[in-house]
Image: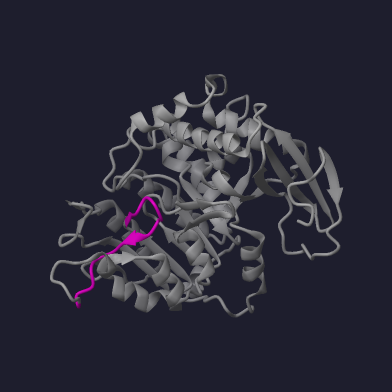
Amino acid sequence: MAAKYKPGDSLTYSASCVSLRWVPLSTVFIAINGPCIYFWVCLSEDNIQMREVHVNNYKFEDELEFFIQLLNKTALMEIGARDTVTIENPPLDSPTEEEVANDMIQVDVRYCQSSALKKLHDIIVTPIADLIEGNELTFVPEGPFCLVPFAALQDSNSSYLSDSFRIRVLPSLTTLQLIHDCPADFHMKTDALLVGDPCFKHIIYEGRRLVQLPGARKEVEMIGRMLNISLLIGEMATKHEVLKRISSVALVHIAAHGKMETGEVILAPNTTRENPQPQEKDYLLTMKDVTEAGLRARLVVLSCCHTARGEVMAEGVVGMARALLGAGARSVVVTLWAIGDEGTLEFMSFLYDALAKGKKASEALHQAMKCMKEIEKFKEVIYWAPFVLIGEDVNLDFKDIRS
């Protein structure tokens, strides 16, 4: 992006200086500079449309960034992501209603009266709607846009963006190029690591004991039956055992507690440790652990709370999803908010049924969302929209994985 942050209202740029053959069509780059949002929409290898949107007549960049952050928080409140679902694995720490309310007071209320999901659609999708072709959308967001629930955005007719498009997210062009440049035989085609309901009975995390996850156990048992693969559950699902196996499988699926700030995963504590009382290093699967272990997985599914989250930087979210991709994973499915046992089990049954039929990850995720919307009990956004596909659009051959 040689002219980054300095496009006109609508410009066509030649990409002859850079090969974009490996960038999917209808890839949308989103960034903030000053009081404006800039979009780059890849229509073909040599045609990138750039557009600029000045939002709410703001004068400063921090006003706009704060507004997008506010809309993300308000969207979560509308969705009910923190208080309308009884969950076995609740968020470990989340902002209070008072904190969110205080944030809202600081922003001009004119811009908060309509649905946050519709307002986000107006800001992100409407300005480029005429450029989008086909039924796939790939977002490359920067800053606060990384935490937008793209699948749940609503147009003026209350239709969700995921009704019309298969959606995935890329942390950056660099990430996509690294994946594309991998040797053809780099990513594994066989075997799976299925981890669920680790034993937490000895763990005291942030002053409290964690509840077990019976739904997570059922989830990996269901996947295990489909693949005829043995599981790591209960006391067997230790950090040590996971790290020992994680670099040699095509599929990684972990159903456990997630740490809200980073998306890091809480596993059963290592049996060999310095202190009888498990310390965080004994059970928390960290970004550093994953990076050092190295991965060759085609798909990693973190069926845990908040695994799409992390520290929001200008270049995107620095969290577990990015660490997994940086460590060698080709694609990851992560969550934007706390997820419930029962709904997640249902969602994953649809997801893996589609994957087993040979569908690509984006299509399988789209199909799972569609199926959830058709069930009265799970039709609300909170049940189907937290799941985000980040990275390449892969498929899995279950026959190879079983072998």
Q: Residue 253 sits in which quadrant?
A: bottom left
- Residue 102 falls in which quadrant of the image? top left
**Number of marks in picture:** 0
Q: How far across and down, in percent of the image, does residue 200 sit?
A: 20, 60
Q: Is residue 403 visible?
A: no
Q: Is residue 155 above or below residue 178?
A: above
- Quadrant containing the N terminus is bottom right
Residue at the spot x=30%, y=75% of the render?
241
User: Position of 226 compared to 397: left or right?
Assistant: left
Q: Nearer the viewer, residue 92 or 179?
A: 92
As displayed, is residue 24 above or below residue 97? below
Residue 261 lies in the magenta stretch = yes
Residue in the picture at 63% in, 58% down: 172
Residue 66 can be seen in this image: yes
Name the residue at the left extreme. Answer: 276
Image quarter hosting the C terminus: bottom left
Coloration of the structure image: one colour
Query: Against 246, is 322 above or below?
Result: above
Rendering coords of residue 37 (x, y %): 68, 39
Which residue is drawn at the image coordinates 54% and 31% (left, top)? 117
Give, as a single range, the part of the protein colored magenta: 257-272
Observer-nearest of 36 and 71? 36
